[in-house]
Structure formats: C-alpha cells, structure tokens
Amino acid sequence: MNLPIVTIEEECPRTQLAAYIDGELLPREELELEMHLASCKDCTAELNEQKKLLCVLDFALESEKEIELPANFTKIIVTKAESNVSGLRSSKERSKAFFVCSVLFLLVLLGLGGQIEPVLNTYIKFTDKIFAVFGFVFHLIYDVSIGTAVILRSLGSGLVNDSGIAFAVFAALVLFSLFALSRLFLRYNRA
C-alpha cells in the first residue's frame, strides 16, 4: 500500500489559530480545531505562544503611561481631515481629468466603428437638452432681475416724490440686505 505523504503544514490549520483566539470561528470550525489541537503538539505550542504574546501586549498597553484620548478625539480628527482635503488636489488635476475623459471618449467612438451614427445622434440630443436647460436658467435669472429692477425703480420714484429722506433710508435698507445676504451665502459655502 502506498499512503500519500502529508506534511504538517497541509494538515495543520495554523492560519486559524488567531481567529480561534479572537473567537471569530464558526462553531463547527472551532470544534474541528479543538479536536486537532488535542492531537497536535506543534499547533498547541503555537497557540500557547500566540496567547503569551497577546498577554504581553495587553500588559504593555495597560501600564500607567497609557495615553488618554479626549472624548471628542474622533470628531477632531474627522474635522481636520475634511478641512485639509482641499489642499490635497493640485491645480492641474481638472485639466488632466478632462484630457483623460476626452481621450477615453475618442477611444469609445473609435471602438464603435459603424455604430457611431446612433451614438452621435444621442450625444447631440443630450447636449441640446443641456443647452436648453442652461438657456432656461439664464432667461429666468435675467427676467427676475429685470422685474426686480422695475419694481425697485417704481418704488424708488414713489419715495423720491414723497421725500428724499425716505428714499435714502430705502436705498440703505436694500444695500444692507444685499450685504447681509452675501455674508450668509459665503458662510454657508464655508460650512
């Protein structure tokens, strides 16, 4: 009879020892490992060595010189990391990204070959819709600003006819409100 030669490394589940110590094994795997440990002195010795190492680490970390972290340590780290993100990007990053996207788009067009016409028609329709939306937004802003100017002009002419002081107060209020709105907008964008 020829029996296959099995080496210790193939038979011994040494990679599961750390998971066993941490309690991360399934009950069936844990039972199989405990049965193996009952018969294998090498794995039992390795398990004991790993337990000793963990005890030494626990003792070293529980000394009186342990560093105490503030209660809001995580919040401070996250806040500082988020505030420093803007400095991580270089000024040329957008132009490089645009170049890479353009090259990829051209490669896709070349890869399509004979099917390029439907894709280009879809792309043209999409850009038409985008320009239509931007045109609508531009005309909306333009019409609102013209309407506001007409209303302010008519209110201003009515105040000037009544008294010059009332117009000066009204103009000061408008300027103050515009200044306050711009400050609020800038604070909102910083947050």
Image: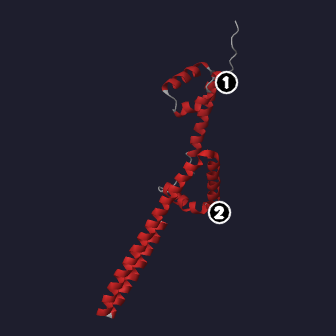
Which quadrant is home to the N terminus?
top right
Taking the spot 40% from the left edge, 82% from the top edge, the residue there is 175
> Vertically, is 56 above or below 175?
above
The type of residue carrying mark 1 is Glu
Disc 2 secondary structure class: loop
Quadrant in which residue 42 is drawn? top right
Residue at mark 1: 9
Q: Could you say where residue 141 lies in the image, as x and y percent from the top left?
A: 42, 71
Cα distance in 3D space between marks 1 and 2: 53 Å
Q: Residues within 10 Å of mark 2 (few under 14, many from 20)?
A: few
Q: Can residue 73 be seen by looking at this rendering? A: no
The numbered mark at residue 185 is: none
Residue 19 appears in the picture as rendered: yes
Determine whether 27 is above or below 80 in the image.
above
Mark 1 or 2, nearer chain start: 1
Residue for badge 2: 92
**Rendered position, 81 above or below 113:** below
| Mark 1 in CB contact with mark 2 (< 8 angstroms) | no
Q: Residue at x 58, y 37 (%)?
A: 55
Q: Nearer the viewer, residue 121 or 182?
A: 121
Q: Measuring 61% from the left and 61% from the top, which residue is drawn there?
A: 94
Callout 2, which amino acid?
A: Lys
Q: Position of residue 98 (x, y in %)?
A: 62, 58
x, y (%) of residue 81?
55, 58
Q: Give the mark count.
A: 2
